[in-house]
Image (cartoon, rainbow, N blue to C red):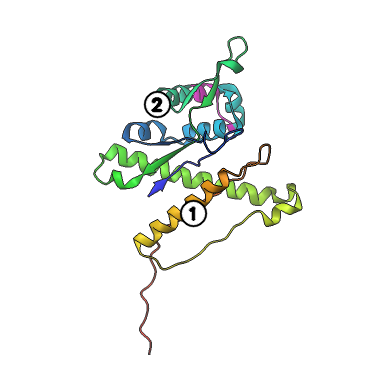
């Protein structure tokens, strides 16, 4: 299973430039913090920024954003963007466009790494929920033709683990194909995919 914090192509990236970084135990522990994940998301979606700019967007103190940006840099998630700097301002940019987490490799991980994975995945889910809620609350601000370009559907299927894995791979291939067709200057579109089993009541035999 792959868990992602949202793979954002950002502005001006094509399919060849798009890079997703696999997380290992060390980098996972360095990223698995709500504010760090939010900072990284902002840099991917909106481009380079300073700690003060990010603090204003996220309603945080610049001291907190500065500290967590330095921690992200120590783990290679962000890097300096000196071409944007003026005077003593320090600008940051995302070092890649997304991350992936292979949770099958965590079964024998130490408790700290398993805890980091839980924190990471819960924040991914929270980010998705906030994005959907924001869209619902602001949908009337968009042009009417976007009504057919959005979707809030859910599906229930009966699949084996192998079939479900095939479904995930097929969805990812389709999305990758659309990345190759991106239109420069068009609005950024977020696509969430959630595929997981749920517990249901046993079926009762027919009378």
Q: Which of the pair 17/139 is nearer the observer?
A: 17
**Does 63 appear above or below 24?**
above
- Which residue appears farthest toward the top when viewing the image? 87
The residue segment tinted magenta is 58-66
Query: Mark 2 or 1 closer to N-term?
Result: 2
Residue 90 shows up from this direction: no
Q: Which quarter of the figure has residue 161?
A: bottom left
Comparing marks 2 and 1, which lies closer to the viewer? 1
Identify the residue position indicated by label 1 in the image.
171
Secondary structure, mark 1, is helix
Q: Which of the pair 164/202 is nearer the observer?
A: 164
Q: Which of the pair 179/89 is nearer the observer?
A: 179
Where is residue 87 drawn, in percent x and y? 61, 9
Residue ID at (38%, 30%):
30
> Few, some or many C-alpha atoms within 10 Å of disc 2 (few <14, some 14-19, many ≥20)?
some
Query: Considering the image in quadrants, where does the C terminus appear?
Result: bottom left
């Amino acid at each position: 299973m792959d868990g992602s914090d949202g793979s954002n192509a950002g502005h001006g990236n094509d399919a060849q430039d798009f890079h997703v970084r696999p997380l290992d135990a060390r980098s996972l522990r360095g990223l698995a913090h709500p504010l760090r994940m939010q900072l990284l998301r902002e840099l991917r979606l909106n481009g380079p920024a300073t700690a003060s700019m990010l603090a204003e967007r996220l309603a945080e103190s610049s001291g907190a954003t500065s500290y967590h940006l330095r921690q992200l840099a120590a783990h290679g998630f962000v890097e300096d963007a000196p071409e944007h700097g003026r005077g003593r301002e320090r600008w940051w940019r995302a070092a890649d466009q997304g991350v992936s987490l292979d949770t099958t490799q965590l079964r024998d991980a130490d408790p700290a790494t398993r805890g980091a994975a839980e924190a990471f995945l819960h924040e991914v889910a929270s980010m998705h929920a906030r994005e959907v809620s924001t869209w619902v609350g602001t949908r009337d601000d968009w042009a009417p033709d976007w009504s057919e370009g959005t979707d809030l559907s859910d599906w229930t299927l009966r699949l084996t683990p192998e079939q479900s894995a095939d479904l995930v791979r097929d969805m990812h291939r389709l999305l990758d194909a659309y990345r190759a067709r991106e239109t420069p200057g068009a609005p950024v579109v977020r696509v969430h995919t959630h595929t997981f089993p749920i517990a249901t009541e046993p079926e009762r035999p027919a009378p």
